Image (tube, grey):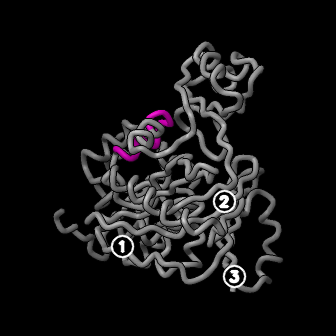
Amino acid sequence: MSKPKQLPPGAVIGILGGGQLGRMLSVAASRLGYRCHVYEPGPAPAGDVAHRLTTAPYEDEAALRAFAASVDVVTYEFENVPAEALDLIESIVPIRPNRRALAVSQDRLAEKDFLSGLGLSVAPYAAVDSAEDLAAAMAGQARGIVKTRRFGYDGKGQVRVAAGDDPAAAWAQVNAPSVLEGFVDFSAEISVIAARGQDGAVAVYDPGLNVHRDGILRTTTVPCGLPSRLIPEAVLLASRIVTALDYVGVMGVELFVTAQGLVVNEIAPRVHNSGHWTQAGCAVDQFEQHIRAVAGLPLGDGQRHADVVMENLIGDDIQRLPQLLAQPDTQIHLYGKAESRPGRKMGHVNRIRR
């Protein structure tokens, strides 16, 4: 493998998406001497800290061309960027992680097929394109979740089904190409944050134990407290995925812990909410690691130096800020969002456990 061409200090990294992940990527990039140009169609928390912000829809070809011409490399904070926009950008400047990783993660069916092709365990699944397809798929599953193949996150685009439910009613709620995933009997949910550099080097952070509520991540605890034999298995599994995709950057790999072993739930080709703990627990956090990778720098040390519990601040949780500020060993990250709404991530805290 050829030696990566490193971006020099002062180079400009383009970021598609201006939410909290783009915000924290911009901060990490600035520490390494880079400037960030964020492209975001709507309100952009990342715009408060980025060197430059373009506010335009992804359908605006002139804005996309100007954005791509102004940067040295492009990365992204979320995976649902329209393919047409990516085609245009990629004709001008490299995109990292690559388009294959995006194509796999943008489509739940493609994702399941890819993971199964690697010999990894996934939930039983079936493609669903109509109420009739759903009825046939439900006949083989006592319980499951219908998930839209594209554009679902934080519990959106999902409908739970069970034997005896009306397939037509469930289909009416999604009404889009979907996947029926069979129920997985799991004892815990964990995630692994993995990074791969342009030289093929891989660094994997310790797995974190995740707790979700209403489809949204609430806490991640590291160490995860699982049997020691599962830790290297999770790390190797994540390494296989990023290597198979010829990936460059940070990826989140979500896993179910079952009596039979680890089952891959989904992958996210970007920095991940469950990796925020690395800001307090590692010398090089996931955001700096991602910038290092896309800029062609050597990956940093991902070893954990502290135990951490990360808690998302969602909606009115932000009202607890005065109490949180008074707590020792607590690192607070607010996203600069003007309005709190139910289910909206307003920030997070990292509690260091000594």
Crowding near the residue tagged with mark 2, few <14, some 14–19, many ≥20 C-alpha atoms within 10 Å: many
Q: Is residue 109 magenta?
A: yes
Q: Position of residue 296 (x, y in %)?
A: 28, 68
Q: Given the image, on which type of amino acid does mark 2 rest? A: Asn
* C-alpha distance separating marks 2 and 1: 25 Å
Question: Magenta part of the protein: which range?
Answer: 100-110
Furthest-left residue in this view: 2
Image quadrant in which the N terminus is located:
bottom left
Our reading of the magenta stretch's main secondary structure is helix
Q: Earlier in the sequence, mark 1 or mark 3?
A: 1
Residue at figure coordinates x 64%, y 16% from the top left: 135
Secondary structure under tag 2 reads: strand
Q: Given the image, on which type of amino acid does mark 3 rest? A: Arg
Q: Earlier in the sequence, mark 3 or mark 2?
A: 2
Number of the front mark, 2 or 1: 2
Residue indicated by mark 2: 210
Residue indicated by mark 1: 299
* C-alpha distance separating marks 1 and 3: 26 Å
Q: Given the image, on which type of amino acid does mark 1 rest? A: Leu
Closer to us: 248 or 117: 117
Residue indicated by mark 3: 353
